[in-house]
Image: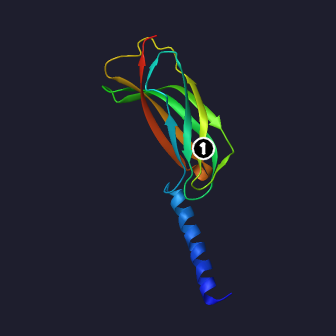
Amino acid sequence: MGLIEKQININGVYSLILRKSLLLLGIGSAQIDLILPKNTYKSGECINGYFLIKGGTLAQRIRRIECDLIMDTHSTGMEEILKTSTILSSREINSGESNEIPFNFCLPTLKEPYKRGVSYRLKTRLILDQGIIGKDDDWILIDSE
């Protein structure tokens, strides 16, 4: 192996180490986006959408997807988790790849879903190997039944 080939090989190793280090900081890791057909739902309605997962700079293993329905009360700054859904996984997403995973979530029946100063969101977390997390928030409106 000549000097040029050795230099290219060494640069390739450093590039891989740099990309893996950046992944640990969350830079260049896979991303998640919850795609919903609409943003207004009735209390107790089931939502059918999908998670769009886009691969980062390197292949990564998906451990799980968590999605929480959160009620934010603006006057107090409090947030309450009303319902949680978890999808366990062992699939791998390759660099630059896009995958769609179905999302089915039935909203709880709420006594007063539409109140002044209260909003709802679906908070999604993509948990990858080594604890790397991708996040997404989708605000929704919930009306009475």
Residue 1 x %, y %: 68, 87
The residue sitting at 60% across, 44% down in the picture is 99
28 sits left or right of 40 in the view: right
Q: Quadrant of residue 139?
A: top left
21 sits left or right of 70 in the view: right
15 sits left or right of 76 in the view: right
Q: Residue furthest bottom?
A: 2
Residue 136 x %, y %: 47, 40
Vertical order, 145 against 135 (above or below): above
The residue sitting at 59% across, 51% down in the picture is 97
What is the total number of numbered labels drawn onto the structure image?
1
Residue 86 x %, y %: 61, 33
Q: Quadrant of residue 67?
A: top right
Residue at mark 1: 99
Q: Between 2 and 72, which is closer to the camera in this rendering?
A: 2
Q: Between 18 and 11, which is closer to the camera in this rendering?
A: 11
Vertical order, 145 against 123 (above or below): above
Q: What's the residue type where badge 1 is placed?
A: Asn
Vertical order, 67 against 110 (above or below): below
**Disc 1 secondary structure class:** strand
